[in-house]
Structure formats: C-alpha cells, structure tokens
Amino acid sequence: MSPAFLAAAATALAFTVAGLANAIGVGDAERNFRAWGYPPGWRWVTAGIEIAGAAALLDPVTKPFALVALWLVIIAAIGTLVRHRAGPAHIVPAIGFAALLAVTTLLSLWRGLYG
C-alpha cells in the first residue's frame, strides 16, 4: 500500500468517526452547533458531508471531490471555532483534522504528479 492510500485511509477513518459523533450527538453536538449560530439540525448536514467525504476519499475517481468537500468543512469549522473563541478542546482536534487532510492532499498531489 502506498503512503497516499494510507494517509487517505487514516483521514477517512478520522472523518467517519467525527461524522458519527456529530450524527449521534456526542458531547452536546446539537447545543454546540446552535451556540455557534447554526440552525437546528445542522450537525446532520456536517455529519453527512464528513461520512460521505470519508467514503469518497477511498476511491481515486471521487477523491478530488472528497478533498474539496472536507477542506470546506474543516475551514468552516476552524473559522467558526476561532470566531466564537472556542477553547482548545475544540480547536486542537480541528487542527489535527486539517493536518491529516493536508498530508492526504499533498501525498495525493505528489502521487498524481510523480507516481
């Protein structure tokens, strides 16, 4: 298995877990989304994008679309957390997701250009 695939698989696993956590409401997800200004049920939208994006990361045809969708989610998440001055308990994991996504993106681009 290539490093690009392993990075995509790790990122997919992380986003699947995050999506499931949002879907089942771990840690008062609904309340947090409401406090950050999102409409009721928005966690379901986020969960759907996270889970669908995670699955799409594992297929080379859909991977570029998944990367774009997941980058939009994580940029919006970090922007929301910074704007609402969320503490490290929220910001640190979001940065971790961005780092995973960055590694996956860079390895995918590298593999596409040189692999």
Image: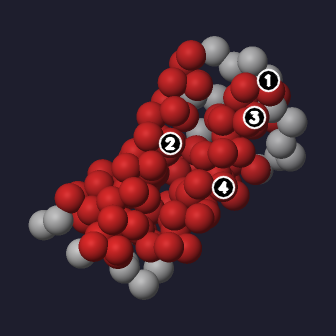
For the view shown, which residue lies furthest in the bottom direction?
61
Dots 3, 4 in contact, CB < 8 A: no
* Badge 2 or badge 4: first in the primary sequence: 4
Pinpoint residue 82: horizontal percent, then vertical percent.
73, 26
Looking at the image, which residue is at 59% across and 39% down? 25
- Kind of residue indicated by mark 3: Thr
Direction from residue 72 to residue 92 in the image, left or right: left
Lower position in the chain sequence, tag 3 or tag 4? 4
The residue tagged 1 is 84
Q: What residue type is disc 4 on?
A: Leu
Residue beneath label 3, please?
A: 80
Identify residue for label 2: 98
Q: Which of the two residues, 28 or 47, is positioned nearer the viewer here? A: 47
Q: Quadrant of residue 4?
A: bottom left
Q: Position of residue 12 (x, y in %)?
A: 38, 57
Which image quadrant is residue 57 in?
bottom left
- Secondary structure under tag 3 reads helix
Q: Sequence order check: which comes first, mark 2 or mark 3?
A: 3
Q: Name the residue beneath numbered marker 4.
A: 72
For the residues labelled 1 and 3, the Cα–Cα distance comes to 6 Å
Q: CA distance from mark 2 to mark 4?
A: 10 Å
Q: Are the residues at dot 1 and dot 3 in contact (C-beta closer than 8 Å)?
A: yes
Q: Secondary structure at mark 1?
A: loop
